[in-house]
Amino acid sequence: MLDRSERRAQANLLALVAALVALTTVSTVAVVVADGALADATREPVERQRANAVADRVLAADGALAERENALNATRLGSLDAAALRDLDAVPEDADVRVRVDGETVASTGDVAGGTTVSRIALVVDREARTVTPGLDGRDRVTLPRRTPWIAIDLTPAAGEVTTVRANDRVVLHDPDGLASGRYRVDVSRRVTPVLAFAGDDLDTGAVEVTYAPADSRKVVVEVTVDVE
């Protein structure tokens, strides 16, 4: 049988082994946690940088979705999908990307489970073409709503011969012998109320048909999330 001193030594040895096991376990867990924290700390700046790059391309004035600077065309935005998102040339191959507008996902390249999100304030511009037939019997001009960048003018000489068309006193179409029938497109400033004036012979209602596309815009929050694999 072991005497008291031997039993005490054996107990101390067991306690030392247990302490070493506990210390090793704690150290392993601490290393794992530290590695995870380091990976997260390294990943977030990379994801944020890439998310900002994608957001820049989504809102770029010369981008595929642009109506103008910081404004998205509603029709083009509605057709955005994963392939079109990849075509923006800013989407990293080793990450999944999601674009949301006012909290609604409009396009995603994969399953974005986490990642880093950046937000931008922008406009979504919706244009719906409208057509009017000015009554030219007794008057020679028509005023259209602002925020239209172009006007299409259809001429029908059977209702009178148009020789000159002015947009805000600027001559945009002219033929002293009479403009041929057909459609003419005229670019105008969306910041100015367009006023069209017509000159010609025996002008009557139906000689001119005008099509324009005023903009209806709304402010939105665009969110881009990048989740590095």
Image (cartoon, rainbow, N blue to C red):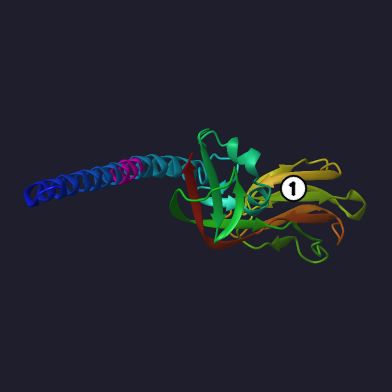
Choose between 143 and 15: the one closer to the eye. 15
Choose between 42 and 222: the one closer to the eye. 42
- In the image, residue 128 lies at what x, y percent? 72, 58
Instruction: Determine whether 199 is above or below 217 in the image.
Output: above
Mark 1 crowd level (few <14, some 14–19, many ≥20, 10 Å Cα) = some
- In the image, residue 50 lies at what x, y percent? 43, 40
Choose between 167 and 45: the one closer to the eye. 45
**What is the magenta range?**
32-39
Q: Disc 1 marks which amino acid?
A: Thr
- In the image, residue 185 lies at what x, y percent? 73, 45
Q: Label 1 belongs to which residue?
A: 164
Viewed as shown, does residue 56 lie left or right of 108? left
Instruction: Determine whether 201 is above or below 39 in the image.
Output: below
Mark 1, secondary structure of its residue: strand
Residue located at (38% from left, 41% from top):
43
- In the image, residue 220 lies at what x, y percent? 52, 61
Q: Is residue 8 visible?
A: yes
Q: Is residue 36 magenta?
A: yes
Residue located at (78% from left, 41% from top):
176
Viewed as shown, does residue 92 lie left or right of 22? right
Q: Is residue 191 visible?
A: no
Magenta stretch: dominant secondary structure? helix
